[in-house]
Image (cartoon, rainbow, N blue to C red):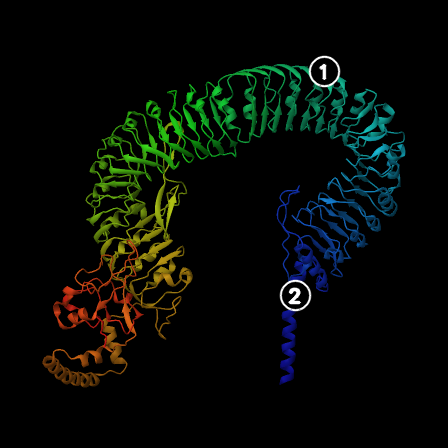
Amino acid sequence: MMGPSFLLAQFLCLLFFHSHSQPAHSSSNFSSSVQLCPGDQSLALLQFKNSFSMSSSPYGFSCYPPKKVLWKEGTDCCSWDGVTCNMQTGHVIGLDLGCSMLYGTLHSNSTLFSLHHLQKLDLSHNDFNRSVISSSFGQFLHLTHLNLNSSNFAGQVPPEISHLSRLVSLDLSSNSEELMLEPISFNKLAHNLTQLRELYLGVVNMSMVVPSSLMNLSSSLSSLRLWYCGLQGELPDNFFRRSNLQSLDLSSNRELTGSFPPYNLSNAISHLDLSLTRISIHLEPHSISQLKSVEVMYLIGCNFVGSNLGLLGNLTQLIELRLAGNQFGGQIPFSFGKLKHLEYLDLKYNNFIGPIPDVFANQTQLAWLDLSDNSFQGHLPFSLRNLKQLSHLLLSANNFTGKILNEFSNLTQLTKVDLSNNRFDGQIPSSLENLNKLESLTLSFNNFSGKILDGFCNLTQLNDLDLSNNKLSGLTALFLSNNQLIGHIPSQISRLSVLNSLDLSHNLLNGTIPSSLFSMPSLQALLLHNNLLYGQISPFLCNSLQYIDFSHNRLYGQIPPSVFKLELLRTLMLSSNDKLTGNISSVICELKFLEILDLSNNGFSGFIPQCLGNFSDGLSVLHLGANNLHGNIPSIYSEGNNLSYLNFNGNQLKGVIPPSIINCVNLEFLDLGNNMIDDTFPSFLETLPQLEVVVLRSNKLHGSLKGPTVKDSFSKLQILDLSNNSLSGPLPTDYFNNFKAMMSVDEHMDYMRKNNLSFSTSYVYSVTLSWKGSEIEFSKIQIALATLDLSCNKFTGKIPESLGKLKSLIQLNLSRNSLIGYIQPSLGNLTNLESLDLSSNLLAGRIPLQLVDLKFLAVLNLSYNQLEGPIPQGKQFNTFENGSYEGNLGLCGFPLQVKCNKGEGQQPPPSNFEKEDSMFEEGFGWKAVAMGYGCGFVFGVSLGYVVFRARKPAWFVKMTVHIKMQKGIEGRMLPEMVEDDTSKLLRAVNNGSCQEEGIIFQASTEDANKILNNDAAFAYCPICDQVLSKSLMKPVEINPNDEWINAVGYKARRATYMHSPDCLVSVQS
């Protein structure tokens, strides 16, 4: 029996291994027979990577975006990014860490050099912190490609590089200028690297290398780039006759001489750059005819022999031609019109004259045209309209004249235009308004006149506009908002005499606001908000301003009185400057056209001008919140006013809420929270049909909410916050039934705002709420936000089932009241709910299973109630911690340490009748009950007789209460509990405001005797009448030598305390 079983087990193991190993091979591009990456090579790679930091370096990385090396230890290194393995042996043969943000020193003992099988190595675009190229590179005998470009190497190129006889490509360019290649090392390199096809040594110091030694390089060489290497001396003519040479760059070797092109030149050259050398360039027919394969020719600042520039027109394969800085004169040769593949033409810094010929009519591929710094004259040719691929048109510093008509109408790909330093006149062409890709436009130092195009404001990609030194007039708007502008605001802006709108908001501007801005005669809108501006606001010397927004800066001092003389002012926003102080003058009511007044989050003091309620029918927004204002709320609000946003939150206002607010029929937002208003709930607000937000939190509101008296009261209400008051009575069920906006989920992602204001602006509403246990300022209120907060009041009764209709609620907070009954299962219908707080009430029963389905519930607080039974499990309930349930001694299950009894289910608690039936079913028949009743009757009568005679049976008290000397009971009292003046030994420790929980109470032995021996003892025990719940009591240690006792009981009628089995009394023996 063991034999077949063992074979079966082996078969299953092999099958399991095969099914799991096959995908691992395929994911790494190996067949099932290939070995994994050797462990020593995997370790070497990890140690190499870990020897460098991955942060930004002082040297800077020239590629973007850089990549991060994320190799995971314990995985097959052949699957790592940048690692290539031999598919047969598994050895690492390729490593590409180019642009990987490696920073640090590359030492000669690096584990990199243990990877002997490497064939391709790319460490380019990193920062090796001026490391010396190690001689250990010579150990990579299999290497065919080595790229150390732009990696901040220094020192001498080691001669051991010549040991890499299999190299096909070597790139040491663009490192530190201190990287040097000495003649001996170069000669060895040239002699041994016979298979080399690509050699890039740009910026490597080769000043000691004789140019003739270049002849020793491999005959297979196809690409040679030796730019800025310090080469000096004469280059042999034979060098240009190399048959395989296709790309040659010898630029920026200013002491390099020679002659080009020689006779019998190789036709293979396609890329040629001899710029900034002393090599003679011969413009002769027999020599130029040999360059017909050239596609890229850079001959900037060269030594030309001959002036027949038209010969270059025969190089019909040319794609890029750069001839800048050569002192060419005359006109552009007409033969250039034959260069139909040309995409890039640079003729700047020459002496070309005359008008631009129509040679560009057929060059429809041209993307870059630079004719700047010449002596061209006349008008721009109409043929420019044919260059529909043109992205750069640079014509500065010439003598062009005349008007620009529709030459730009078809050039929709333009990103940069520079026509500066010419003599153009007339108006700026309207065709420029249609260049939606334009990033830079420079028209300075011309004779343009007329108005500046309004359409420039629509060029969203434009970041550089220079119109200086023209004869322009009429710049009416300048919008530079939402950039990263720094420094001071230039006072020269005030020279724009007809400017009517200036928007520099949302930048990093600092310094003071130039006083000259307040003298601009045509300025109507000045928006400087969200910067770092500081200082006092200067007097306003012109009367044209209608829109002022200096909010969210660091301004200080008082509002200059001249502001109140701006008769046309419609918007004044100075919020969030912190240090603006002084009184708000009643003169402000003379601004009859004011629509928005926002002075919030400052240090204003004094009284609110009473005239603000009725001075203007056009006022839509009045926000004076978060200041130091005191006195009463303006009492008169005129009929027909347009007020939609009223916010006095966070001041020291007293008195009542004025009933005249019912005249604000357009009111959408009312926030009077965090004041000292002493009033009942303003039920007249129910008549306001547009009301969406009501915040009256943290005042002295009292009384009950009587319910609606009008149809559809509060039907649009989204946010109601009455927390931290003294409101009482039952929860306003009838109001809940009218909260229509909270009954439907609004998925609109916009924000609450006031639209249709002057200057096509809108005012976005803001509010501060207690949100998921923290004070949060919502600078924007999403329309979908719905919250109901009635916490920290004196509401009584049950939670109404109708709350379950408010399906859009995101937060519901009924904590710290005196609510009784069960948690309504209908709350499980609040599918958008993210926060539910019912803590510190008198709620009983079990937690409804329906709450488990609230999939967005992130915060749950049911603590300090009288809940019992198992805590529901699953979904969000698995994320809540002990704090959500503490203070409910009857609860059990996760996350509490208390385990539920075996078999205790999640069903609702049984009725009293069910409990009685279950007792009989478990064995308590009528016989057992009768026997117990009889015995109990006899014992009770006897005991009663003894008590009646003895009056104070201390032995009975000891026996019944089962006192333990070291234990007592601690409880939490209602917020109203205070220290009793008639009993000096009573103490109440207060540790909160509305959250005055954790109050400890104790009573002396003398008072306890009064409680035990006299029904009137409750007159001496205010504690017993103030205890919130027995379920909130817990054992505490008591000093046996202290004559203290603890008294605990349910909050109930006094007459029932001494007879209730729940009133526990502990007396010291």
Question: Which of the two discs, 2 and 1, labels the residue nearer the N terminus?
Answer: 2
Residue located beneath label 2 in the image: 21
In terms of secondary structure, where does tag 1 sit? strand
Image position, residue 104 (x, y; %): 67, 50
Q: Is residue 919 left or right of residue 832?
A: left
Image position, residue 463 (x, y; %): 56, 30
* Numbered disc in front, either 2 or 1: 1
Badge 2 crowding class, 10 Å Cα cut-off, few under 14, some 14 to 19, many 20 or more, is few
Q: Is residue 1031 left or right of residue 745?
A: left
Residue drawn at the location 17% of the way across and 83% of the way down: 936
Residue located beneath label 1 in the image: 353
Residue 922 falls in image quadrant: bottom left
As displayed, is residue 419 above or below residue 267? above
Q: Is residue 246 left or right of residue 717?
A: right
Check contact, mark 2 vs mark 1: CB within 8 A: no
Q: Nearer the viewer, residue 336 or 36?
A: 36
